[in-house]
Amino acid sequence: MRTLIAALKTHNNAYYVLDNPMIEDSEYDQLRLSLIELEEEYPDLVQPDSPINQVGDVPLSAFTQVTHDLPMLSLGNVFDYDDLSDFMRRVNDRLSVAQQNPEYEMEMKLDGLAVSLKYEYGQYVQAVTRGDGQTGEDITQNVKTIRNLPLWLADAKDIELLEVRGEVLMPKAGFERLNRLAEENGEKTFANPRNAAAGSLRQLDPAVAASRPLAFYGYSVNQGLPERIDTQSGALAWLGDIGFTVSAVRVVANPREAQAYYESVIEKREKLPFEIDGTVIKVNSLALQQQLGFLSREPRWATAYKFPAETVMTRLHTIEWQVGRTGQITPVGKLEPVKVGGVTVSNVTLHNFGEIQRLDVRAGDMVSVHRAGDVIPKVTRVWEE
Ligand code: I6G
């Protein structure tokens, strides 16, 4: 049973998190079946971390509201190097001379949904959405079906209450598969992986949630962290050690190093298996975090260093017809200039008359313009309302 569980965990991670299956689905099913048979034969030996009961309980009629022990706050934003330096200067202003220029921890800002998990003596007991920050919805049954979520933490069996927060997301490949399937079945498709993840967590039937390719990435320990751990980077390393998936961490010393990390993440962005919308920078020392505290609803010791928006709204003033060298006529939308993907855009190709008909776009419309990476900007939507 232990061998089968270890193999299933490896393959769940390869499939749901890395999106790189190592065996055929039929072989995977065979492994699962072998474990189910052993569990039926030896019910007393069913292991607490068995992935078999991770496929969804009975449907709910509604979600219960749960008040967070500690509020789930949000992060402030910075968008460029100057804002980032200002943030780090403001941190310094609140620290003593001896505490100046603290170490910072950085990680990617995953574009998912924040959830709070609770484990009692190592056993998974609850998952709650962020909600309004004070009160969220109990989504314990749905989150339980997430394949890379540890249900049993052997290394935390002596911890009365462990609260881990993190992000539930749908990897890009799983999202595309899900939408392709929905299209084939004539069902509604999701606009993006984040919406798909949100829709999956809101399912009242956990069996539906179980069929969705979701993953959980931990980003903080809010209760029950062993006392010997005194940094955010240490907390994440510990989460990784006890069985959680966590994203990679970089410790930086100054704004230049922070900027270099941010730029290295932008470089990697397209190739990542999931969507991100920036990076997060936190004072690494947990004691200094405590000392710095909060301003209204945001921590003073952390901020999101966001990527430039890739989809923005603007007005399409007119449509002009350009005649190319070969005589081909191309409609070009003249936009109210707008910053998208880090550059200012004032013209957008509408390709051909068919595209204008498809979008039903007219002079004077409010439109969404999308520009990602080096790809030319395009109109993705017309806002009729
Ligand atoms: O919304 C968030 C995403 C990622 C966070 C966060 C985070 O750390 C990587 N950290 C904090 C402290 C908060 N929100 C409030």
Image (cartoon, rainbow, N blue to C red):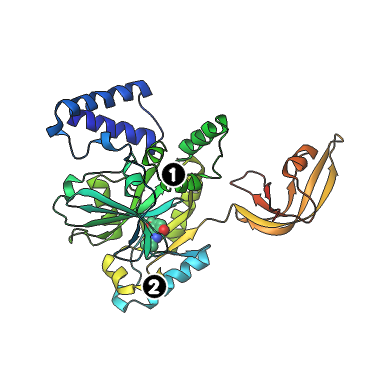
Which numbered tag is attached to residue 200?
A: 1
Which numbered tag is attached to residue 269?
A: none
User: x, y percentage for residue 259?
Assistant: 47, 58
User: x, y percentage for residue 169?
Assistant: 42, 46
105 on left or right of 83: left
Q: Earlier in the sequence, mark 1 or mark 2?
A: 2
Q: Quadrant of residue 301?
A: bottom left
User: x, y percentage for residue 241?
Assistant: 23, 46
Residue drawn where x is 76% and y is 48% of the image: 361
Q: Quadrant of residue 338?
A: bottom right
Crowd band around label 2 with a 10 angstrom C-alpha radius: few (<14), some (14–19), many (20+): many
Whether the residues at callouts 1 and 2 have beta carbons within 8 Å, the answer is no
Residue drawn where x is 12% and y is 33% of the image: 44
Secondary structure beneath label 2: helix
305 on left or right of 308: left
Q: Could you give the CA–CA distance between mark 1 and mark 2, rounded to whole angstroms? A: 38 Å
Q: Specify the amino acid type for callout 1.
A: Ser
User: x, y percentage for residue 213?
Assistant: 41, 38
Q: Specify the amino acid type for callout 2.
A: Val
Quadrant, the N terminus = top left
Does residue 24 appear in the picture of this structure? Answer: no
How many numbered marks does the figure carry?
A: 2
Does residue 232 appear in the picture of this structure? Answer: yes
Which numbered tag is attached to residue 91?
A: 2
